[in-house]
Amino acid sequence: MTTSQTTLRSIALAQPATIRVFERFHLDYCCGGNRPLAEACAQKGISADDVLAALAQATAAPEPAGDFTQAAPSELIRHIVSTHHAYVRSELPRLLPMAARCATKHGPAHPEVVQIERQLRQLGDELLNHLTKEEIILFPYIEALEKFHNGDGPAPHACFPTVESPVQMMLTEHEAAGALLKEMRAATNNFAPPADACPTLVGLYDGIDAFERDLHRHIHLENNLLFPLAVALEKQLVVAH
Ligand SMILES: [Fe+2]
Ligand SMILES: [Fe+2]
């Protein structure tokens, strides 16, 4: 059980999800983390109780994902953007600097950490581009299709022949992202940190593991629910014309 006398380092190692809290409070859990939480908080002039409450919240069971099987496309889009796109955009700036630090520190003894850093950067670049395409081109078109279908707007005009072409592009990009994460998982024996890993590396692998889980849920909502709905809506539009 975590108390104010537990060291930051052992809290971070036992429950890497707590690293987000330490970062938020600017508490060093890694190289300088070998001291009790109470002492670290006193030095920073922050309340150990506040940090303990935030730690408990960070390690609580996540909210179960909602059931979107009956959701309208616009509802799915709102959820995907506010939950999954927001997660990608908040996690990458957290994980990338951790990866850079770990590659420098652990790269000489564990070359796979250098590979992880390179592949995480590649994944980040590709994914951010991907989210922008969805938010600027594909999702607004799907929302317009739904509005038209509901008699709430004009027939949408697209810069592509059918919605199936951007959908196909998104499916291909989803596969590429999934394949990169699979390679990273294989190179690290399922994101198992080496025995001599510092808390930052433990946190990095835990963070990428969670990132992959979130990406799978995100891709499931798009591939299996949103995109088929968009294709079906567009077919009705063609029939209506
Ligand atoms: Fe997406
Ligand atoms: Fe996507």
Image (cartoon, rainbow, N blue to C red):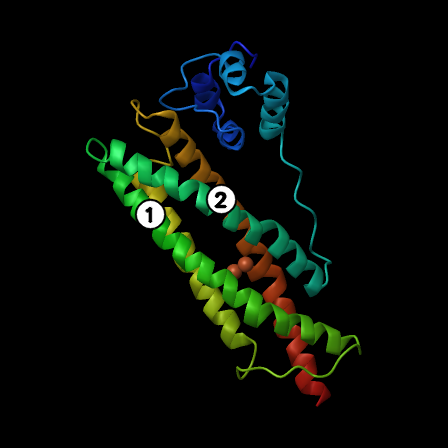
Q: Is residue 109 above or below residue 2?
A: below
Q: CA distance from mark 2 to mark 1?
A: 20 Å
> Can you tell me whether the CB of the residue at mark 1 lies under 8 Å from the nearest atom of ligand 2?
no
Q: Secondary structure at mark 2?
A: helix
Q: Residues within 10 Å of mark 2 (few under 14, many from 20)?
A: some
Residue at the top extreme?
A: 5
Give 13 or 188, whichever is nearer the viewer: 13
Q: Is residue 68 above or below residue 184?
A: below
**Residue drawn at point x = 79 percent, y = 76 percent:** 152
Position of residue 7 measured from the top left corner of the image (x, y, whole percent): 46, 14
Q: Is residue 100 above or below residue 158?
A: above
**First of labels 2, 1 by sequence position:** 2
Ligand 1 shows up in which quadrant of the image? bottom right
**Residue 188 appearing in the image:** no
Figure quadrant of the C terminus: bottom right
User: In the rendered image, which residue does mark 2 sit on?
Assistant: 91
> Can you tell me whether the CB of the residue at mark 2 lies under 8 Å from the nearest atom of ligand 1?
no
The mark found on residue 183 in the picture is: 1
Name the amino acid, label 1. Answer: Glu
Residue at the right extreme?
A: 151
Q: Nearer the viewer, mark 2 or mark 1?
A: 2
The mark found on residue 29 in the picture is: none
Position of residue 38 measured from the top left corner of the image (x, y, whole percent): 54, 12
Residue at the bottom extreme?
A: 241
Q: Is residue 22 left or right of residue 235?
A: left
Position of residue 100 measured from the top left corner of the image (x, y, whole percent): 32, 40
Q: Residues within 10 Å of mark 1 (few under 14, many from 20)?
A: some
Name the amino acid, label 2. Answer: Glu
Which corner quadrant of the image does residue 220 belong to?
A: bottom right
**Residue drawn at point x = 35 percent, y = 40 percent:** 99
Q: Is residue 225 above or below residue 31?
A: below
Figure quadrant of the N terminus: top right
